[in-house]
Image: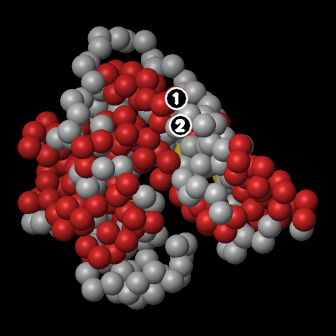
Amino acid sequence: MQHPLTALAPEYTSLLARMVITREAAVTATAKKLIGFIDLGRYKAGCDATGVPQIVAAASFEREAASNFRLSPAQGDPWDRVSVHVPRGEGPFQNWSGAQIRAYRIDHLDAVGAPNWSWERSCYEEELFNGFGPRNHCKHTGYLWAGTNIYAGGKYPADGVWDPNAEDEQLGVIPMMYRIMQLRPDLALPSAFPAAVASIAPPAPPAPPPIGLHNAGALQAAFNALGANPQLTVDHSYGRETRRAVEAFQQAVGLIIDGLAGPATWAAINANLKQS
């Protein structure tokens, strides 16, 4: 099965080249704050251990937890006690770096490899972490693009609830990363940022989720029928919890653990459903 990144990379490249920051003051202020955390060494130990670039770690944790270092990147629970949200039972950790390393390993970000963190790969991993649901509504996700011309509204204000008129008031991870790179070139990703193109036309709608990340609603319902605990929200968005459920199932039935619901995984799911 072709890796979904292969299918999505050209789209990401095009969007990155067309991106214009629309919330300049907020993006610049946030980037400066995140650079301050980087210079304090907040991310260094965890990033050195996993190969995840500090620019990715900083923007992602700002988006997820407003850079609250009392919380774990894995699920937002305090890292100094056992987690109660999925993934449950994690911790306590000795420090935030320990929680950071564990979180990245849960989602296999450490498997990417430091030299392989391109801008397209960053887009893919961050969209996968949050979920591909907006694509089902022909919208580019605010998780990546809020604060730029690529984002045109729409979000999930609650689990399983899509509001096409809602505005994502947070900043997307990509404009934060881009401004950090501009202010501190030494923190840039290993790959160059795509060359800008001059275009006033709005970006094309996103492609549907590719094979391995599609049919999320059916997948979530199938896992619930098989006794998923906790039950998954059937929101048709392939994100972190669905991916983790896929990985747990693949491990249980002896498949390659990649978190992608390809033909072999679906065949095993259907076989188990017939037996249940």
The image shows residue 269 at horizontal and vertical percentages of 77, 56
Label 2 Cα neighbours within 10 Å, binned few <14 / some 14-19 / many ≥20: some
Count of labels in the image: 2
Q: Is residue 219 visible?
A: yes
Q: Which mark is residue 133?
A: none
Mark 2 lies on a secondary structure that is: helix
Where is residue 231? Give x, y as percent. 71, 69
The residue located at (59%, 61%) in the rendering is 247
Amino acid residing under circle 2 = Pro
| Left or right side of 191 for 3 | right
Tell whether 121 sits left or right of 5. left
Mark 1, residue position: 7
Question: Percent position (x, y) of residue 83?
Answer: 47, 82
Tell which of 42 and 5 is nearer to you. 5
Q: Residues within 10 Å of mark 1 (few under 14, many from 20)?
A: some
User: For residue 132, what is the image quadrant?
Assistant: top right
Quote the CA–CA distance across marks 1 and 2: 5 Å
Q: Is residue 274 above or below residue 78?
A: above
Residue 257 in the image: above or below residue 2: below
Is residue 162 visible in this depiction of the protein?
no
At 44% from the left and 33% from the top, the residue drawn is 151
106, 181: nearer the viewer: 106
Dot 2 corresponds to which residue? 4
Residue type, label 1: Ala
Quarter occupied by residue 245:
bottom right
Tag 1–tag 2 contact (CB < 8 Å): yes
